Image: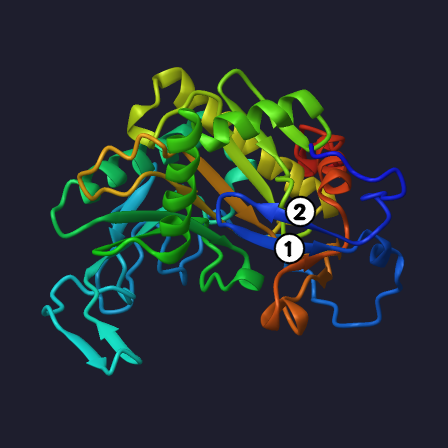
Amino acid sequence: MADTSSHFDPTEQSHRRYNPLLGQWLLVSPHRSKRPWQGQQEAPEVEKRPAYDPTCYLCPGNSRVGGVQNPNYTGTFVFDNDFAALQATVPVGSVNVRGLLRAEAESGVARVICFSPRHDLTLPEMEVGAIRGVVDVWTAQYQELGARPDINYVQIFENKGSMMGASNPHPHGQIWAQRTVPDDPARETTHQLAYWSEHGRSLLTDYLAIELEEQTRLVYQNEHFVVLVPYWAVWPFETLLISRRHVQDLAQLTDDEKNALADALQQLTIRYDNLFQMSFPYSAGLHQRPTDGQAHESWHLHMHFYPPLLRSATVRKFMVGYELLANPQRDITPEVAAQRLRELPSVHYKKSQPQ
């Protein structure tokens, strides 16, 4: 960490932090975490759901909108999104009015991944073996879609909870695979390549080495993966899951590494649920190398988790005002957030409650 003045205390005083993956700054205001909250509070999400819901269009055997019937799947289930944001048959075309009004046709594929046939099982309540099944599907989908000549990036993600826009409570994720590389992965490509060109090592390899030395932002680690609150985290309990070995994508992981990824996913999401004893909402997504035919040696596999909750199950962080007009800002420091997550039990709170 860079040298600081003896009068500067980043645990108490406002400061800026730099995100080397995106090349962006954020404002940290730790003194503001002491302020009372009189703003909006969200209603906690209802916890109890049946194992099977006859009205759910994602449950096994049920019909989706349009009349397509789901198979009686017993593990994961993947299908093309009935309301896809990307269309595969968009003709090539563009608009350019004096360089200011620009548009380009964008083709792609959007799919849905049901994690489990169980309507009531989110990742933190699934067994590690079942989560490994999800990892295998992610890997197969990345390889299948990425092999297509019309697909140059495969974005795998999950929106968990209605607070994050999930339209159905059945545990599921999505894949949007498209012709171009979206903005954030494109920025990460640029900054990882610049670091690789200068140092001959991956940016996240060197960053992870610092985090393992300092220990203050670690949440969970196993033999192959580390979960931490990044130094530049924007969301209160944002985390970054990084592979210890420098690999560019899921397809390069060994069986042991895939098992370790499943374990890390379970342990992180258990801690999230335990934080406020609720089904913790977040948006999460894997970032891996583009599938444009280039090697992208500088890319390092990682996964982002962006949860919105701040103080409790009912108080969330809003990106407004300064954050919309200037740059992101946070109150609780990443170090404090990591400590809170790290110290939580590794057993899901529902299993420790009397039945």
Q: Residues within 10 Å of mark 2 (few under 14, many from 20)?
A: many
**Residue 316 placement: quadrant:** bottom right
Q: Disc 2 or 1, which lies upstream in sequence?
A: 1
Q: Is residue 96 left or right of residue 312?
A: left
Q: Residue furthest bottom?
A: 97
The amino acid at mark 1 is Leu
Give the distance between the C-alpha atoms of the residues marked 2 and 1, in whole angstroms. Answer: 15 Å
The quadrant of the rendering that contains the C terminus is top right
* Residue that label 2 marks: 237
- Whole-percent x, y for residue 156 in the image: 36, 47
Q: Is residue 160 left or right of residue 339?
A: left
Q: Is residue 149 above or below residue 40?
A: above
- Whole-percent x, y for residue 118 in the image: 44, 44
* Residue that label 1 marks: 26
Tag of residue 111: none
Q: Is residue 57 left or right of residue 144?
A: right
Identity of the residue drawn at 27% across and 78% down: 99
> Looking at the image, can residue 173 be seen?
no
- Whole-percent x, y for residue 336 in the image: 78, 40
**Residue 87 placement: quadrant:** bottom left
Identity of the residue drawn at 40% across and 24% down: 200
Q: Is residue 122 left or right of residue 197?
A: right
Q: Residues within 10 Å of mark 1 (few under 14, many from 20)?
A: some
- Whole-percent x, y for residue 44 in the image: 69, 61
In depth, the one of 153 and 58 nearer the eye is 153
In depth, the one of 240 and 169 nearer the eye is 240
The secondary structure type at the circle numbered 1 is strand
Q: Is residue 198 above or below residue 221?
A: below
Circle 2/circle 1 CB separation < 8 Å: no
Identity of the residue drawn at 41% across and 50% down: 187
Q: Is residue 341 above or below residue 112?
A: above
